[in-house]
Image (cartoon, rainbow, N blue to C red):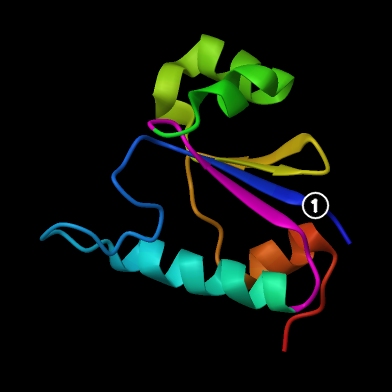
Amino acid sequence: MARLEIFEPARCCPSGVCGTNIDQGLVQFTADLEWVKSRGVEVERYNLAQQPDKFVQSEPVKNAMALAGDKCLPIILADGRIVAQNTYPDRSILARLAGLATE
């Protein structure tokens, strides 16, 4: 199974359930990440506003942001390699990236 790291744009909370504008896509992504984690996949989630050091420490993320700025976010790494950017993958794609079978 792969280790997934999600590097997200600056926002007040990663779940998307904050403020008056609730992002349903982000709510679904959060639920899908929990599903992946419940199957034993290691998942780390980083927010640019709260953990900028993680973005600088990751060479692939740092390089992508040098080329496109924060427009490339979110970036999804699987075992240290960029596997998705500028989109939140759905459950079936997350499962494939993590080496899981979907139900």
Q: Which residue: 69% across, 71% down?
A: 36
Image spot of residue 96 (x, y percent): 77, 65
Q: Which amino acid type is marked by label 1?
A: Arg
Horizontal side of 48 relative to 91 (left or right) equals left
Image spot of residue 83 (x, y percent): 70, 43
Q: Which residue: 32% across, 59% down?
A: 16
Residue furthest to the right in view is 1
Quadrant, the N terminus: bottom right
- Asked if the magenta segment contains residue 40, the reply would be yes
Q: Which residue: 73% across, 69% down?
A: 95
Quadrant, the C terminus: bottom right
Q: Quadrant of residue 26 in the image?
A: bottom left
- Asked if the magenta segment contains residue 15, the reply would be no
Q: Quadrant of residue 19 in the image?
A: bottom left
Q: Nearer the viewer, residue 69 or 7?
A: 7
Q: Which of 52 and 83 is in front in this view?
A: 52
Q: Crowdedness of circle 1 by 10 Å Cα count: few (<14), some, many (20+)?
A: some
Q: Mark 1 points at which residue?
A: 3
Q: Quadrant of residue 12 in the image?
A: top left
Judge whether 49 appears above or below 77 on screen.
above
Image spot of residue 25 (x, y percent): 36, 64
| Region in magenta | 39-49
